[in-house]
Each structure stands twice: as C-alpha cells, then as structure tokens.
Image (cartoon, grey):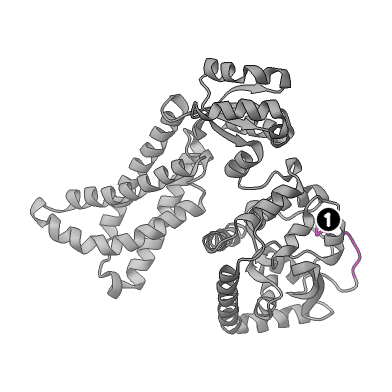
Amino acid sequence: MSKAKKLIILFGDIILLYASLVATLLIRYKTSEFPEVFTNHIKPFSVIFIIWIIIFYLNDLYRERFVALNFSTIQRCLFSVFLGAIISIVLFYLFASFFQLTPKTNLFIFSVIFALLDLGWRFSLAKLYISSGWRNRILTVGQSPIINEIIGHLKSNPQMGYDIAGQVSDLSEIKNLSQIISEKHVNTVIIQPNFKKDTEIAKAAYKLLAAKILITDSVTFYETIFQKLAFEELEESWFVEKIIILRPAYEFLKRMFDIFLSFILLIALSPVIAIIALLVKITSKGPSIYKQERTGLNNKTFVLYKFRTMVTGHNGPLWTTQNDSRLTSIGKFLRYSHLDEIPQLYNILKGDISFIGPRAERTELAELYRQLSYYDLRHIIKPGLTGWAQVNYKPSASVEEAKEKLRYDIYYIKNRSLPIDFLILLKTVKYLFTSLK
C-alpha cells in the first residue's frame, strides 16, 4: 500500500477521534454547556489520542490486509479500541491531577462511537480501493520469482488498489508496449531490473514518459509493498548507489541514546538481575551468565552476555529447536519471557551492540550464512538487541529462513533512521507482550 493511502487512513482516524469526542459531548451535555466542556476535554483527550494511534499502529491497522471487508479487521479494530479505552482509564486515574478528568461514561460512549465510525471508514476505503476509485492498473515487464510474488500478493489484496492489467515476458512484444498500455489503460509499468539494460526496452520506456506513465523496477516496487529487499535480482552496483555507510549525526545520536537507556535500565533492573542470576545458579550446575562469541561490526567478534538457559556441556544443533531438551527448567521461562536477554544491556553500554540493528549471530552461524549473497552487508553497521527482521519474521532455524531475515536486515540498513528505530522499539514492546500470551 502506498504511503499516501496509509496517510489517508491515519488522518481519517485522527479526524474520527475528534469527531467522536464532539459527538460524545453533544450527547452528554446541553448545547449551551458544549463550549466549556469541549475546552475541558480537548487537551487531555488529545494526549490520549496519541496513545490510541500508537495502539492502532502496533496492531498493524495501517497495513493493507486490515483495510478490508473481513472478520479479522473487525476483531483487530475492536480489540485496539478496547485496549485504548483500558489504558485511557488507567492514565486518567493515575494522573488525575494532570488530566483533571475521570470520564468513565464519556469514555465508554466515545469508544463505542469511534469503533463504529472507524470500521465504517475502513470498509468505505476498502470498497473504494476495490471497486474503482483510486486504483492503479499495472503492466509487468519480465518474468521472475519476484514479479510473480508481486502479482500474487496484489491479486490476493485488492484493497491495496492495484489491478494487474497484463504481463509482458517476451522481448518481442516490447515494440508493441505503447499499444498494450493504451488498450489496457495501464498507468504503472513494473520492469524487471536486468531488462532495463536492453536498448529496445529502454527506448520503449522513454517514450512512455510523455504519456505520464509511472515506470519503476520490480525491486523498488517489491521493497515498497513488502518492506524488505529482493536482492536476488540486484547487482553490486545497486548496493554501491543505494547503501549509505556513514551517517555521522545519526550514529552519534543513536549511541547517546544507547548509553543513556542501557545505563538507566541496568540500574533499574539490578534487583531483577540479581534474582534471576541466583535462580539460574541454584537450579542447575554452571555459571549464571553465559558467554558466547558473536560476529559484530566489521566482522569483528565480541563476547555476548546472556543468562544461561541450557545445561552446561551440551551438544546439539546450532539452532534452538522447539521443546529443546537442552533447556533447563528456569531456562525455558527465561527464553519464553526474553528475560535471558537482560545482560546484553551491558553489551550495549560497552558499545558491542546497539538497541536496534541486525541481530548478532554466533560466529559459527555467521560463517555458515556467508554462503548467502550480500550477507556481509549485515556487518557494515553495529548489530542490535532487536531489529527490523526480529519484529517482522520469526527466529531463523535454517539457512533458508536466515535468507528471508536477510531481506529485512538489508532493508533496514538501507533505510535506517531514528524514526524507524523508534517504530522498531514500539513493535518490540508489542512483540514482548504478545509472545507471553
């Protein structure tokens, strides 16, 4: 889904939040009282609305699959409204002196009105995108697994607003490209990257510019809709042009944030660290802290610290499997709750890793994964405690799954920024809570 369409949904939600507040106050109070009560409610509810928008984002309600006419959208939307209402009640009562409101009845009425309006809004957009409205008719030029994946995804998600008008896979058809586009009313052409080197295709594409046809390559389009990178169809020159290695201001601010937050968390969690260390020590033989060599920035190895979750002296596969017999009783809980990761705060403070970045792999696994094309790109930036791959894909347990995670890692490296880092932190918090269900 395009950024413009996502912004339309977002701005629509913001408008509906305020419209629902106005409707609630009109229902609850006399017209003559409305100006005063609106003034009293507008500031505290504006703070609450920010939290509601974050909740909607964390529940993926700004992704294409939840702008659709289905039960899943209804379920996720109602859950987000319920969660927003609960958090709002807690905040109103915990910080009563700040909000100066405890609107139980108003909040209930507001939640009901907003839920109905927002579902209506999303379903209206879905109908608009599916029926006619704002749709793009796409012609693909080339035939590859990436293009086939794009076509399959767009056909399965009509609410994204794209129609596959046709596919040109035979180079002999290129001379008739303008005619095909005119007959099929195409406004977007997606070209396989290696096809752009063909002189005939380049000339045909150039002629389309005057007709205001949007021309893009399949890799760029794939990156936009999947938020990961299809590097199979790329050459080294693409990475030279697109990947920015040095971002001094960003790296400095990120490092300052890492130092500050890791230091605060280490102090705040020191009682928890002591208790977990004691439990690990008394429930199984061996040290409380497990040290492991990992591959980090510039392929340099460092020692990563975690609470020990396995029996000492174990042998087995490099990957942890489900119901792994090597896990101790307390280790299962630590893995499940992710509390075994807490000692990595020391790695962050030292500068071995950051809070956000590609996950640092064991040196043995990193060596194994080098068979994957462009895998070494993961090491041009500092690894992280969490990252884009971690919040979008499951932990890898094979080379093939590691390849899929690499798509997300390289996407992050290409697009890394403070806003993306902030969104990853939010998604990580959501992941931690949902994984405990």
Instruction: Between residue 255 and residue 61, name the one nearer to us.
Output: 255
* Quadrant assignment, res 90: bottom left
Residue interval drawn in magenta? 314-320
Where is residue 203 shown, x and y percent of the image?
Answer: 64, 27
Relative placement, left or right, of 333 versus 20 is right
Q: Which residue is mark 1?
A: 369
Where is residue 272 shown, x and y percent of the image?
Answer: 62, 80
Residue at 28% across / 48% down in the picture? Answer: 20
Amino acid type, callout 1: Tyr
Residue at 66% across / 56% down in the picture? Answer: 243
**Seen from this angle, which residue lies furthest left?**
32
Query: Relative to 343, does residue 418 appear above or below in the rendering?
Result: above
Relative placement, left or right, of 414 versus 364 is left
Query: Relative to 168, does residue 230 appear above or below in the rendering?
Result: below
What is the secondary structure assignment of the residue under circle 1? helix
In the rendered image, residue 74 lying in the magenta stretch gets the answer no
Instruction: Between residue 87 and residue 400, name the one nearer to us.
Output: 400
Residue at 66% across / 40% down in the picture? Answer: 219
Query: Relative to 310, does residue 198 appear above or below in the rendering?
Result: above
Where is residue 144 shown, x and y percent of the image?
Answer: 73, 31
* Residue 138 appears in view: no
Relative placement, left or right, of 261 versus 149 is left
The quarter of the rendered structure image containing the C terminus is bottom right
Query: Relative to 152, does residue 79 appear above or below in the rendering?
Result: below
Secondary structure mostly seen in the magenta stretch:
loop
* Quadrant assignment, res 184: top right
In the rendered image, residue 318 lying in the magenta stretch gets the answer yes
Q: Residues within 10 Å of mark 1 (few under 14, many from 20)?
A: many
